Image (cartoon, rainbow, N blue to C red):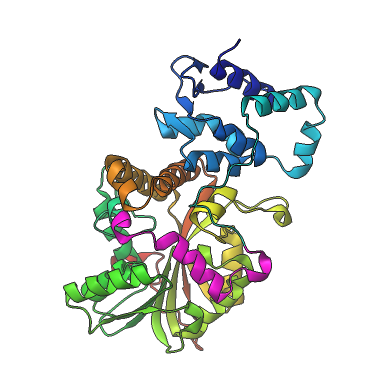
């Protein structure tokens, strides 16, 4: 009788119609596959049941988060080798039904069912959240729940992953050899310079996180700041940090939805890594709300991840793994759509800078931090949650490197009546101010 690894390899190749690019190590310690390739470890038959009951990315994610599926070797290389099957061969319901008409595919699935016995539906890992349907999407209550799922997992865990800067967005790297701390400081200062911050100005930081932007802007550029977040844990951490910096007279942190901010006008608004949570249906409202909160001539810096446009935008579907485990209800849009909606709201978009390669470097830095303190990371949150973050950040680094997604800083101005935007005549000279 064939050992489990060889059976799995043969069945996988029948299903995908191509040689498997990785080795397989099964629960019976058998191995099969290309020598020297990274090893995909199937620790338990339950991994097969996850895949059979939920074919595709979500089934793989459940098996990974539960610890039934693992990688022995370089995670980046393994994900790169598997990318063609995870991302590029993703099947919709129609193509899946068509493939099931193939007798060889049906036979392979029957063999997998027999190998996975007992064929019972495994419970999803406790780290998984579920969508509540489009009627409940991006209400204030659902957004509060989604933000809590992602951010209220322990400030100590985020300190371990992000490092002392506590900045959870793309850094700005002078070179790949720079430190993560230096790159995050340079990103915050780049945002401040693009916004033209000067002493006496009033800044609104939307999605203020753990207060890093607010502290930097107040301390280094002399502004007063209102930061808003939906995370209780972030707000508590930011307030403590601000008190330790002696900046309580210049920074106010609120647990508040951006839609409820009513004390404008502000001289400038920063929105760094927050707009991905807004959603396509609410994005124009988001842009209009920020426009209303700015004084004429005020600037908005919108720092946001973007996906590539599709030929059929109506067919766009959210990433199942990220929606279930990382950013519930998060949505990415092409950068062109974001520019159009900001301009529909009344903004004049004056500058767009792509930081795609910078985010890949940032994510690799975060993964390195987590892997260097793996046992501690699991203790600070949960083994499943730590596995979610490691997979999510490593896969995202590759997605940025391979140009599957990007990230952009958009500088927009609320035009005054006389049309004077207040920016330097020569493009990007404002960076050196």
Residue at the far top in the pictured view: 1
Tally of numbered tags: 0
Residue 109 vs 234, above or below: the answer is above
**376 or 421, nearer to the observer:** 376
Q: Is residue 348 above or below residue 50?
A: below
Residue at 43 percent across and 42 percent down: it is 394
**Residue 298: quarter of image:** bottom left
Residue 20 vs residue 276, the one in the foreground: 20
Does residue 338 appear to the left or right of 273 in the view shown? right
- Residue range corresponding to the magenta coloring: 132-158
Residue 415 seen in render: no
Front position in the image: 349 or 429:
349
Image position, residue 293 (x, y; %): 47, 84
Apparent side of residue 209 relative to residue 307 in the rendered image (left or right): left
Residue situated in front as seen by the camera: 210 or 118 = 118
Query: Farthest residue toward the right?
Result: 101
The N terminus lies in quadrant: top right
Residue at image coords 47%, 55%? 407
Would you say residue 363 is visible in this rendering? yes
Coordinates of residue 403 in the picture (x, y in percent):
52, 44
Image quadrant occupied by the C terminus = bottom left
The image shows residue 422 at horizontal and vertical percentages of 40, 79
Indicate yes or no whether the magenta region holds residue 146. yes
Q: Can you say whether 137 is above or below 267 in the image?
A: above
Q: Main secondary structure of the magenta part?
A: helix
- Residue 250 position, x and y percent, is 25, 82
310 sits left or right of 298 in the view: right
Is residue 127 inside the magenta stretch? no
Picture residue at 18% right of the left edge, 73% below the top: 245
Q: Which residue occupies the extreme front position in the image?
A: 118
């Amino acid at each position: 009788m064939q050992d489990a690894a060889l059976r799995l390899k043969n069945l996988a190749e029948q299903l995908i119609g191509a040689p498997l690019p990785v080795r397989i190590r099964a629960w019976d310690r058998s191995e099969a596959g290309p020598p020297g390739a990274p090893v995909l470890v199937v620790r338990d038959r339950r991994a097969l049941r996850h895949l059979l009951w939920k074919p595709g990315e979500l089934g793989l994610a459940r098996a990974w988060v539960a610890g039934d599926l693992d990688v022995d070797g370089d995670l980046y290389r393994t994900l790169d080798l598997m990318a063609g099957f995870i991302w590029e061969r993703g099947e919709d319901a129609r193509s899946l039904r068509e493939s099931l008409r193939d007798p060889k595919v049906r036979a392979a699935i029957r063999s997998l069912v027999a190998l996975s016995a007992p064929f019972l539906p495994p419970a999803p890992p406790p780290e998984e959240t579920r969508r509540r349907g489009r009627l409940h999407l991006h209400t204030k209550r659902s957004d509060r729940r989604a933000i809590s799922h992602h951010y209220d997992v322990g400030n100590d865990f985020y300190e371990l992953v992000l490092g002392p800067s506590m900045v959870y967005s793309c850094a700005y790297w002078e070179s790949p050899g720079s430190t993560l701390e230096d790159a995050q400081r340079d990103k915050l200062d780049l945002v401040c310079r693009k916004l033209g911050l000067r002493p006496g100005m009033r800044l609104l930081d939307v999605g203020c996180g753990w207060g890093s932007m607010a502290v930097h802007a107040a301390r280094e550029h002399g502004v007063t700041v209102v930061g808003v977040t939906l995370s209780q844990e972030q707000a508590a951490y930011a307030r403590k940090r601000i008190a330790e910096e002696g900046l309580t007279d210049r920074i106010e942190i609120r647990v508040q939805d951006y839609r409820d901010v009513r004390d404008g006008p502000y001289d400038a608004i920063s929105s760094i890594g927050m707009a991905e949570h807004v959603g396509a249906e609410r994005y124009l409202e988001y842009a209009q709300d920020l426009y209303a909160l700015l004084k004429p001539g005020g600037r908005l810096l919108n720092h946001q991840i973007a996906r590539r446009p599709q030929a059929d935008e109506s067919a766009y579907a959210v990433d199942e793994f990220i929606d279930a485990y990382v950013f519930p209800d998060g949505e990415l849009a092409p950068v062109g759509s974001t520019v159009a909606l900001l301009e529909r709201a009344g903004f004049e978009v004056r500058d767009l800078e792509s930081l795609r390669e910078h985010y890949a470097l940032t994510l690799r830095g975060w993964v390195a931090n987590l892997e260097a303190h793996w046992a501690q990371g699991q203790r600070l949150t949960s083994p499943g949650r730590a596995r979610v973050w490691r997979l999510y950040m490593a896969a995202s680094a590759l997605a940025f490197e391979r140009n599957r997604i990007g990230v952009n800083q958009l500088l927009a101005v609320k035009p005054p009546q006389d049309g004077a935007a207040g920016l330097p005549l020569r493009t990007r000279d404002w960076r050196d101010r």
